[in-house]
Image (cartoon, rainbow, N blue to C red):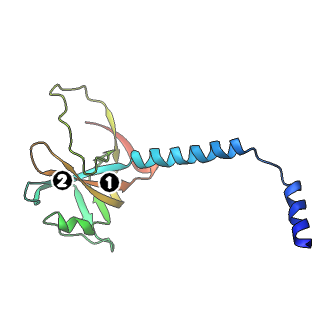
Amino acid sequence: MIANSLFVKARLRASPVPASCLALAAGLLVAAAGAQAADATCITAGRLNTEGRWAPQFQTVRLLDEAGRALPTRNRADLSRVRGVEVTQPALLSTCEGERALTRGEDTATAKAPVPAATPGRLAVDGVGFAKLQSGGELVELKVQVPPDRVVMVTR
Protein backbone atom coordinates (compact mmCIF):
# COMPACT_ATOMS: atom_id res chain seq x y z
CA MET A 1 0.00 0.00 0.00
CA ILE A 2 2.84 2.39 0.86
CA ALA A 3 4.59 1.58 -2.42
CA ASN A 4 1.42 2.40 -4.37
CA SER A 5 0.96 5.76 -2.66
CA LEU A 6 4.61 6.67 -3.28
CA PHE A 7 4.15 5.82 -6.95
CA VAL A 8 1.07 8.06 -7.15
CA LYS A 9 2.93 10.93 -5.46
CA ALA A 10 5.86 10.52 -7.86
CA ARG A 11 3.51 10.56 -10.83
CA LEU A 12 1.82 13.73 -9.59
CA ARG A 13 5.13 15.53 -9.06
CA ALA A 14 6.57 14.61 -12.46
CA SER A 15 6.05 17.21 -15.16
CA PRO A 16 3.60 15.82 -17.68
CA VAL A 17 4.77 15.61 -21.31
CA PRO A 18 1.94 15.78 -23.82
CA ALA A 19 1.49 12.56 -25.77
CA SER A 20 1.59 14.54 -29.03
CA CYS A 21 5.17 15.69 -28.25
CA LEU A 22 6.26 12.13 -27.57
CA ALA A 23 4.66 10.91 -30.81
CA LEU A 24 6.34 13.71 -32.77
CA ALA A 25 9.75 12.90 -31.27
CA ALA A 26 9.35 9.19 -32.03
CA GLY A 27 8.33 9.99 -35.61
CA LEU A 28 11.36 12.21 -36.13
CA LEU A 29 13.71 9.49 -34.83
CA VAL A 30 12.22 6.89 -37.17
CA ALA A 31 12.42 9.27 -40.14
CA ALA A 32 16.04 10.14 -39.39
CA ALA A 33 17.02 6.47 -39.08
CA GLY A 34 15.27 5.67 -42.37
CA ALA A 35 16.98 8.55 -44.18
CA GLN A 36 20.36 7.46 -42.84
CA ALA A 37 19.83 3.89 -44.03
CA ALA A 38 18.62 5.05 -47.44
CA ASP A 39 21.62 7.36 -47.88
CA ALA A 40 24.27 4.74 -47.11
CA THR A 41 27.69 5.68 -48.43
CA CYS A 42 29.63 3.41 -50.76
CA ILE A 43 32.86 3.37 -52.69
CA THR A 44 33.41 1.24 -55.78
CA ALA A 45 36.13 -1.39 -55.41
CA GLY A 46 35.98 -2.71 -58.96
CA ARG A 47 33.92 -4.84 -61.29
CA LEU A 48 33.12 -8.54 -61.58
CA ASN A 49 32.65 -10.06 -65.02
CA THR A 50 29.71 -12.30 -65.90
CA GLU A 51 31.59 -15.32 -64.45
CA GLY A 52 32.01 -13.55 -61.09
CA ARG A 53 35.76 -12.85 -61.42
CA TRP A 54 37.52 -9.49 -61.03
CA ALA A 55 37.52 -7.50 -64.24
CA PRO A 56 39.28 -5.35 -62.88
CA GLN A 57 39.83 -4.67 -59.19
CA PHE A 58 40.85 -1.03 -58.69
CA GLN A 59 44.53 -0.76 -57.76
CA THR A 60 43.87 2.15 -55.36
CA VAL A 61 41.56 -0.01 -53.20
CA ARG A 62 43.02 -2.69 -50.92
CA LEU A 63 40.53 -5.06 -49.33
CA LEU A 64 41.17 -6.06 -45.69
CA ASP A 65 39.99 -8.91 -43.45
CA GLU A 66 38.80 -8.53 -39.84
CA ALA A 67 42.44 -8.50 -38.59
CA GLY A 68 43.30 -5.63 -40.97
CA ARG A 69 45.44 -7.80 -43.27
CA ALA A 70 45.31 -7.63 -47.07
CA LEU A 71 42.64 -10.02 -48.32
CA PRO A 72 43.35 -11.83 -51.58
CA THR A 73 40.14 -12.01 -53.59
CA ARG A 74 39.61 -13.73 -56.88
CA ASN A 75 35.84 -14.05 -57.05
CA ARG A 76 32.53 -12.99 -55.53
CA ALA A 77 32.61 -15.60 -52.74
CA ASP A 78 35.92 -14.21 -51.40
CA LEU A 79 34.31 -10.78 -50.93
CA SER A 80 32.14 -12.00 -48.04
CA ARG A 81 35.24 -11.78 -45.79
CA VAL A 82 35.89 -8.06 -46.42
CA ARG A 83 35.73 -6.06 -43.17
CA GLY A 84 37.85 -3.06 -44.07
CA VAL A 85 39.35 -1.18 -46.96
CA GLU A 86 42.45 0.92 -47.46
CA VAL A 87 42.31 3.54 -50.19
CA THR A 88 45.57 5.00 -51.50
CA GLN A 89 43.94 7.88 -53.39
CA PRO A 90 40.72 9.82 -52.74
CA ALA A 91 37.81 7.42 -53.37
CA LEU A 92 34.57 8.86 -54.76
CA LEU A 93 31.60 8.44 -52.42
CA SER A 94 28.20 7.50 -53.79
CA THR A 95 24.83 6.24 -52.68
CA CYS A 96 24.82 2.45 -52.35
CA GLU A 97 22.89 0.69 -55.10
CA GLY A 98 22.93 -2.72 -53.41
CA GLU A 99 21.70 -5.53 -55.64
CA ARG A 100 19.68 -3.26 -57.96
CA ALA A 101 20.37 -3.02 -61.65
CA LEU A 102 21.97 0.26 -62.67
CA THR A 103 20.10 2.34 -65.21
CA ARG A 104 21.95 3.72 -68.20
CA GLY A 105 22.87 7.37 -67.80
CA GLU A 106 22.62 10.04 -70.44
CA ASP A 107 25.26 10.00 -73.16
CA THR A 108 25.83 13.73 -72.81
CA ALA A 109 28.84 15.01 -70.92
CA THR A 110 28.13 17.16 -67.90
CA ALA A 111 30.23 19.99 -66.56
CA LYS A 112 32.89 18.99 -64.05
CA ALA A 113 31.81 19.74 -60.52
CA PRO A 114 33.12 18.98 -57.04
CA VAL A 115 31.97 15.64 -55.65
CA PRO A 116 32.54 14.06 -52.20
CA ALA A 117 35.42 11.61 -51.73
CA ALA A 118 37.03 9.78 -48.83
CA THR A 119 40.63 10.74 -48.10
CA PRO A 120 43.31 8.04 -48.34
CA GLY A 121 43.53 5.67 -45.36
CA ARG A 122 41.59 2.81 -43.80
CA LEU A 123 37.80 2.62 -43.49
CA ALA A 124 35.47 0.11 -41.88
CA VAL A 125 33.27 -1.85 -44.31
CA ASP A 126 29.68 -2.56 -43.22
CA GLY A 127 28.77 -4.65 -46.26
CA VAL A 128 29.41 -5.48 -49.87
CA GLY A 129 26.89 -4.87 -52.65
CA PHE A 130 26.82 -6.03 -56.24
CA ALA A 131 25.07 -3.55 -58.51
CA LYS A 132 24.09 -5.21 -61.79
CA LEU A 133 25.48 -3.64 -64.97
CA GLN A 134 23.40 -3.58 -68.15
CA SER A 135 26.44 -4.67 -70.16
CA GLY A 136 26.89 -7.75 -67.95
CA GLY A 137 28.80 -8.24 -64.74
CA GLU A 138 28.50 -6.28 -61.52
CA LEU A 139 30.08 -3.32 -59.76
CA VAL A 140 31.52 -4.21 -56.35
CA GLU A 141 30.34 -1.60 -53.85
CA LEU A 142 31.72 -1.33 -50.35
CA LYS A 143 29.36 0.21 -47.79
CA VAL A 144 31.75 2.26 -45.67
CA GLN A 145 31.74 4.37 -42.52
CA VAL A 146 33.38 7.70 -43.37
CA PRO A 147 33.93 10.19 -40.53
CA PRO A 148 33.09 13.78 -41.56
CA ASP A 149 36.74 14.86 -41.22
CA ARG A 150 37.71 12.26 -43.85
CA VAL A 151 35.42 13.69 -46.55
CA VAL A 152 36.87 16.08 -49.13
CA MET A 153 35.51 17.54 -52.33
CA VAL A 154 37.30 16.63 -55.56
CA THR A 155 36.62 17.68 -59.12
CA ARG A 156 36.35 14.79 -61.52
113 vs 11, nearest the viewer: 11
Q: Label 1: which residue?
A: 120
**Number of numbered discs visible in the structure rendering:** 2
Q: Residue 25 appears at what percent x and percent y?
A: 63, 45
Label 1 amino acid?
Answer: Pro
Q: Residue at x 86, y 64 (%)?
A: 7
- Please indicate whether residue 103 sits to the left or right of residue 68 in the image: left
Quadrant of the frame with the C terminus: top left
Residue 32 location (% of width, % of height): 51, 45
Badge number at residue 82: none
Q: Residue at x 36, y 49 (%)?
A: 41
Which residue is at the far bottom? Answer: 67
Q: Residue at x 90, y 66 (%)?
A: 6
Q: Tag 1's secondary structure?
A: loop
Q: On the image, which quarter does residue 3 sit in? A: bottom right
Name the secondary structure under disc 2: strand
User: Residue 35's image quarter?
Assistant: top left
Q: Is residue 138 left or right of residue 37?
A: left
- The mark found on residue 46 in the picture is 2
* Amino acid type indicated by mark 2: Gly
Left or right of 18 on screen, residue 54: left
Give the quarter of the image for residue 128.
bottom left
Please identify, in this view, whether the residue under mark 1 or under mark 2 is nearer the observer: 2
Query: Residue 22: x percent and y percent?
Result: 68, 46
**Quarter of the picture holding the N terminus:** bottom right
- Please provide percent x and percent y for residue 116: 35, 41
